[in-house]
Amino acid sequence: MTGKRTATSDLWWKNAVIYCLDVQTFLDADGDGRGDLVGLTERIDYLAGLGVTCLWLMPCYPSPERDDGYDISDFYAIDERLGTLGDFAEMLRTAQDRGIRVIIDLVVNHTSHRHRWFASARKGRDAPYHDYYVWADERPDTPEQLVFPGEETSNWAWCEESGQWYFHRFYAEQPDLDTANPAVRDEIAKIGAFWLALGVVGYRIDAVPFLLEEVSGPAGEHKDPHALVRELGRFLTRRRGDAVLLGEVNLPYDKAVEFFGVAGDELNMMFNFPLNQAMYLALARQDATPIAKTLESMPDIPSECQWANFVRNHDELSLDQLTDDERAEVFETFGPSEDVQVYGRGLRLRLPTMVDHDEARIRLVYSLMFSMPGTPTLFYGEEIGMAENLAIPGRLSSRSPMQWSTAPHAGFSPAPEGARLSRPAPEGARLSRPVPDDVSANVTDQRRDPDSLLNWMERLIRQRKECPELGWGEVTVLHAEGPLLAHRCEWDGLAVVAVHNLSGADAKLTLSLACDRLQGLLGAEDHTPGDELTIGPYGYRWYRLTT
């Protein structure tokens, strides 16, 4: 049995700072126009300096790229365009040396149609691996569950070779695996064990509810769909004691909390989609009420589990848990043009564009997210206020190359002109994804400016890591009237209070708290309880309560 403070290192994910990136858009080291593992390894020190403690990599597996790498053709290899397994191992060693753990995407609710399993399965119902997938002799007359409405019209696709229909929730090129099949579950465990053995510490599991939903099997079989994650978690923990499972579960709290398990024996972490969407509604209204109501409705979760908070992730900004009227409010405020709206449920913009590149508002939002109970998660480029590139279609607009400087291609790649190369660019090299015209938000310039967003973000991360109350504590809403939100996180006799003004005008607040002093954090001045605080436009204050 360990004490509370000792447990903070065992349950490292409770107070981590997670940084998500796509290798192919981070840094191109070989000049072929695509980011690679060697380039990422060169930038591990940058991430360490920023304060990142956990690196989450989007898929690096071989893929035909129908769904930006989430259509996987081999779970046991690295896409040769990104490097080799040796490059991956060197990246892991470098990250570990700098104190950064690495997790990767585990995408096992489907495969690519070019995976060897499906290549065999489609040959007929007696073929090897046929039962790894979900088939029907007649196209089922069931309600459609389309992840990409407008791009797909049905969950069922016809396979000429087998003379059957196969099920897919995403693209037709991504046939769903039948997770009710014990052989498929064994394969998932082997995949998980393989990458753990190389040195990753866990997985971000894609679309968890789809993974667990029962789609086939005789009546009465597979009565406990949650057993899959429970068994996987136990298996991986036996292989590595600090292994973590971070799940994508975009559901309301009453349904999402089930995926932590009864005693925290399923997912260790889960993205906090309800809080994220409430935050955007509050920002659109300049009214703290939606955030306060969401914080007060957050369910109790097992002590070893954690919410992962975020401003933007790698997909569209999903607003599907808001009502139609609420979603319309957010659209009208942050993305009224139909060309920035996607699937009728979200926006394909990054935050800076939504707030007209107003740095005061950008800092407000990240201060707010980092002060929420849970673990903060960043998407690459957020630390410099990088915008999207709307020239890239669909939700991929937020996955443009990282902006390192004002050099050609924002310093991401020397392709195709061959500029800044120590050797000639490969023949025909071109960028895998275009860089926007405006790259004024870049790492090099901001490193030179002590007041830049990047340097502020480093200070914010350092402060957040020094406030375990935010990762471990119990949250209490102290004030939520108009644009002002004040909340407290308390843990092990320590407490931190955060105050945020969601409006562009001064707001006043008096905090009467049982302490001797409000010790200012993040550059705030100290105050005495009962002092009237004036919070400037889009302002924020963090305090530690001291006695």
Image (tube, helix red, strand yellow):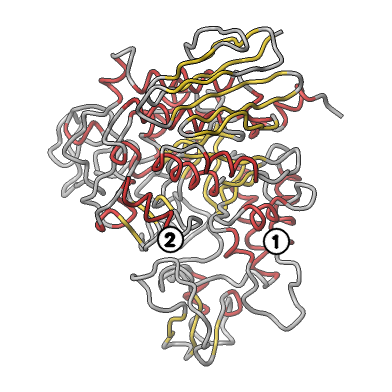
- Residue at 53% x, 49% y is 273
Q: Is residue 170 above or below residue 543?
A: below
Residue 380 x/y as whole percent: 39, 36
Q: Is residue 431 above or below residue 111?
A: above
Judging depth in this view, the residue of 168 and 398 nearest the camera is: 398
Say which quarter of the image contains residue 152. Answer: bottom left
Dividing the image into 4 quarters, which one contains the N terminus?
top right
- Give the secondary structure at mark 2: helix
User: In the rendered image, which residue does mark 1 sit on?
Assistant: 228
Is residue 28 visible in the rendered image? The answer is no
Give me the residue at 26% from left, 58% from top. 338
Quadrant for the C terminus in the image: top right
| Residue at 52 percent of width and 21 percent of height | 509
Mark 1 burial class by Cα count in 10 Å: few <14, some 14-19, many 20+: some
Q: Position of residue 210 (x, y in %)?
A: 57, 65
Quadrant hosting residue 400 = top left
Say whether marks 2 and 1 touch (CB < 8 Å): no
Location of residue 383 in the rendering, given as x and y in whole percent from the top left corner? 38, 29
